[in-house]
Image (cartoon, rainbow, N blue to C red):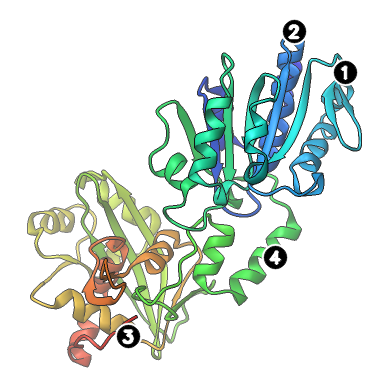
Amino acid sequence: MSQTARIELPPKLIPVFASKSRYKGAHGGRGSAKTRTFALMSAVKAYQAAQAGISGTILCGREFMNSLEDSSMEEVKQAIHSIPWLNDYFDIGEKYIRTKNGLVSYSFCGLRTNLDSIKSKARILVAWVDEAETVSDIAWKKLTPTVRENDSEVWVTWNPEAKGSATDTRFRVTPPSDAIIVEMNYTDNPWFPAVLEQERLDDMRRLSPEEYAWIWEGAYRTQSEAQVFRNKYRIQAFEPQSNWQGPYYGLDFGFANDPTAGVECYINGNTLHIRRECGKTGLELDATAPHILRHMPNAAKYPMRADSARPESISYLKRHGLPKMVGVKKGKGSVEDGIEFMKSFDEIIIHPDCKQVASEFRLYSYKTDRLSGDVLPVLMDEHNHWIDAARYALEPIMKKRGSFKQTSIRMI
């Protein structure tokens, strides 16, 4: 078994397979190595069982599988071939994979059409469901009880698409108590290939931020009339130029469960650029200035505007590292006016370094009527910490240009 220690895994997946949990899983975007890693570890599991004299099946399922070409078989074969000692231990044919001592074999099936036959499988040691986003609730209810051997496990890997899908609800929103599920994206893959990096950069240029985030960052696929900044922003690398206005700094104070969030903004013509961000949940006040200056080194040289509802915090930071802190007055309609002012820019460009900002711009939404689905002229009070920081940063510019009143919203 010392040989297994030489298998290299993405660091984020090491605790998943080191745990004794019954349910193991990973969700996320393209290029994360999650499928390849789960394929490899299924072979390790088969090796361990066969070495211990345990017979059984490694079940690999997908929602749809019309033939072995639609299955995970090729992924498993490639994973086994990549490790010499595993390759030596398995008998691999065109349509089968099994240990050479015959104790453990692989079975591949489509859950939509073969659920009832799964019960007849030999002892299932591991049931791994790949591309699991579309697996139905009834399929999960039928599958999991069939995996009933001692120490048997259920593995699930998927690229999220719809919030509220059966798989996402079961394993991400309300996961089983005996589960370890992680998010895996290309940034978590230490062997992310150059050819995919070029594809990622091309997608960043040509796709909408929502589509890019779904493909590469494991985000839900969202593009709706309810999105506040729909078609208003894009993600693109840039560096501020000497003829731009700024920098403008804003800070939104956090609480126990909310992050303290800061941004660094610039204006070029009628384009808003957001170059840097900082932020952390549970950030103590005495650690706030060092955290900000670590991520935004010039913040102490310029005014930084923050919520005036926290005057004691502003006073503290003025005396401890951020001498030009300014309180921003809030009043009725100030949030709506600030958002409409931001939307009045021809374009908002967010630097790829600002991942939290980009996430909020994608998710920040108007409320929708639960029965009719109509978009309402009411802002949701969520996904708005870095957006609030940007509003504060831009307050003096908004005052100079005059207040912006809420515009009409297209109803659906």
Q: Secondary structure at mark 2?
A: loop
**What separation in Å lies between label 2 and label 3 (alpha carbons)?**
65 Å
Which of the 4 image quarters holds residue 378?
bottom left
10 Å neighbourhood of mark 2: few (<14), some, or many (≥20)?
A: few
Q: What amino acid does circle 1 point to?
A: Lys
Using the image, determine if residue 218 lies above or below residue 369: above
Which of the 4 image quarters holds residue 406?
bottom left
Residue 199: numbered disc: 4
Image quarter (top left, top right, bottom left or bottom right) of the C terminus: bottom left
Using the image, determine if residue 388 lies above or below residue 155: below
**What separation in Å lies between label 4 and label 1 (alpha carbons)?**
40 Å
Q: What amino acid does circle 2 point to?
A: Gly
Determine which residue is flagged by label 2. Answer: 53
Determine which residue is flagged by label 3. Answer: 410
Using the image, determine if residue 399 lies above or below residue 44: below
Q: What amino acid does circle 4 point to?
A: Glu
Q: Residue furthest front?
A: 116
Q: Earlier in the sequence, mark 2 or mark 3?
A: 2
Location of residue 227 in the rendering, given as x and y in whole percent from the top left corner: 36, 73
User: Is there CB contact under 8 Å for labels 3 and 1?
Assistant: no
Q: Earlier in the sequence, mark 1 or mark 2?
A: 2
**What separation in Å lies between label 3 and label 1 (alpha carbons)?**
64 Å
Q: Secondary structure at mark 4?
A: helix
Determine which residue is flagged by label 1. Answer: 100
Q: Earlier in the sequence, mark 2 or mark 4?
A: 2
**Which of the two discs, 4 and 1, sits closer to the camera?**
1
Using the image, determine if residue 10 lies above or below residue 405: above
**What separation in Å lies between label 2 and label 4 (alpha carbons)?**
45 Å
Viewed as shown, does residue 351 lie left or right of 193? Answer: left
10 Å neighbourhood of mark 3: few (<14), some, or many (≥20)?
A: few
Which residue corresponds to the image point at 18% horizontal and 91% vertical from the top-left? Answer: 402
